[in-house]
Image (cartoon, grey):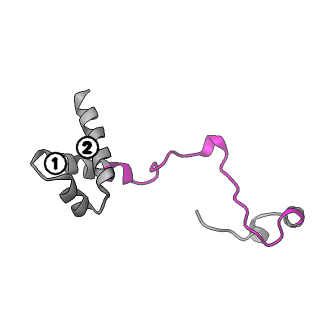
Amino acid sequence: MRYQKATEVLPCELVELIQKYIDGGYVYIPRKQENKKNWGEGTSIKEELDSRNEEIYQKYQEGFSVRQLAGMYYLSEKSIHRILLLKRQENEI
């Protein structure tokens, strides 16, 4: 998302009305409900994170410690524990 100058996209009357409420400030205009996207929907980040998490789980199975994995992936030990728990649960299903 990028900023757009209100005077370039809105009618002058509307800009003046908005200025009565917030003069020179920033206003966030949310998307319409039917246009909203889920997190990561526009990119491949979900697949990349799932691949990374699977790799972490496999390395743990091979004998790497939680501390080693945290250092290798620049994550906290708590995050590694969370990933391992989720992967164990996925594999049980």
Q: Give the range drawn in magenta.
A: 20-49
Quarter of the picture holding the C terminus: top left
Decide: is 42 above or below 18: above
Residue at 28%, 50% in the rendered image:
80
Coordinates of residue 25 in the picture (x, y in percent): 76, 69
- Left or right: 73, with 63 as reference point: right
Q: Is mark 1 on a helix, strand or loop?
A: helix
Q: Is mark 2 on a helix, strand or loop?
A: helix
Coordinates of residue 8 in the picture (x, y in percent): 75, 70
Decide: is 22 above or below 90: below
- Between 81 and 73, the residue placed more toward the observer is 81
- Between 7 and 86, the residue placed more toward the observer is 86
Chief secondary structure of the magenta portion: loop
Quarter of the picture holding the N terminus: bottom right
- The answer to if 63 sits in the magenta stretch is no
Report the amino acid beneath label 1. Answer: Tyr
- Left or right: 92, with 14 as reference point: left
Mark sitting on residue 24: none
Question: Does the CB distance between marks 1 and 2 fall below 8 Å?
Answer: yes
Task: Identify the residue under disc 2.
Answer: 84
Coordinates of residue 32 in the picture (x, y in percent): 67, 45
**Badge 2, how many Cα within 10 Å: few under 14, some, many 20+?**
many
Closer to the N terminus: mark 1 or mark 2?
1
- Between 92 and 12, the residue placed more toward the observer is 92
Task: Identify the residue under disc 1.
Answer: 60
Coordinates of residue 61 in the picture (x, y in percent): 13, 44
Residue at 30%, 39% in the rendered image:
86
- Using the numbered discs, state the Cα–Cα distance from disc 1 to disc 2 in whole angstroms: 8 Å
Report the amino acid beneath label 2. Answer: Leu
